[in-house]
Amino acid sequence: MNTFGPTTTNDDSDGPQWRPLDRIQRRVAGVLVEKAKTTPENYPLSLNAITTGSNQKSNRSPQMDLDPSDVEVALEELREMGAVVEIQGDGRVAKYKHRMYDWLGVDKVELAVMAELMLRGEQTVGELRGRAARMEPIADINALRPVLQSLIEKKLVLSLTPEGRGQVVTHGLYQPNEMDKVTARAGEISASESSRPTPAPKVSQDAASTLREELAELRQEIEQLKERVSTLES
């Protein structure tokens, strides 16, 4: 029995039909969503474009070195699930579009959040806010929290650490064996953090949290600039 999927069945065409995905399927789906939002003029995507996007150095964790054949298999599997459709592009080159809005049952901002989590895995709420904001406007963490709560209620997002500063979240699309490893790793990190002695604060916790968020945003802006330069040079 799938404990990580939606409560609706695949026979319910009006509701979300998502299920756990493997790491290549998640990467491919994330790339399709990301490129549709950030470079709509180049969307839908060809097999080669999806492969390049899957292997790019910026905005990806872990780094991958996929062959077009790997990506093609993942696309076919996603197509069979109803998450991706193949269309005929210019010059009869096959191109692909995602159906993740319907497949996941999410809105525009929720899909931006899910794409970032699929492309990078677990991350802090502050990091996620800065990264997802490149696809859809998210003013600050306070604006992100109701979005996360909605996704948590849909079982699409899981909180790996207690709510508050430094909270870590991830998507719920892992396969069961992967989910066990992710939650175990999060538990080890949480235990390690709680066992450390609390140092004398040199700045307030709120100020430190703000600085971390600003640093995450600056890093994200740098990555976006690198990606734009790479696109211009290609």
Image (cartoon, rainbow, N blue to C red):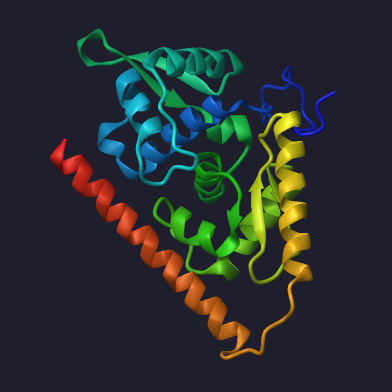
**Image x and y of residue 103, in percent:** 60, 29
> Is 125 situated left or right of 38 in this image?
right
Residue 160 visible, this orientation: no
Q: Position of residue 170 (x, y in %)?
A: 64, 48
**Does 130 appear above or below 181?**
below
Quick check: 156 above or below 24?
A: below
**In this figure, what is the number of numbered marks?**
0
- Above or below, 23 against 219 in this view is above
Q: Position of residue 172 (x, y in %)?
A: 69, 40
- Extreme-top residue of the structure: 92
Rendering quarter of residue 141:
bottom right
- Quadrant including the N terminus: top right
**Residue 93 in view (yes/no):** yes
- Which residue is at 19% across, 48% downward? 229
Question: Image point 74% across, 78% down: which residue?
Answer: 197
Q: Name the image quarter holding the C terminus.
A: top left
Q: Judge whether 106 appears above or below 6 on screen.
A: below
195 or 2, which is in the foreground? 195
Residue at position x 51%, y 18% in the image: 74
Q: Position of residue 204 (x, y in %)?
A: 60, 89
Quarter of the image for residue 41 reads top left
Q: Residue furthest left?
A: 233
Question: In this orientation, which residue lies closer to the viewer: 112 or 165?
Answer: 165
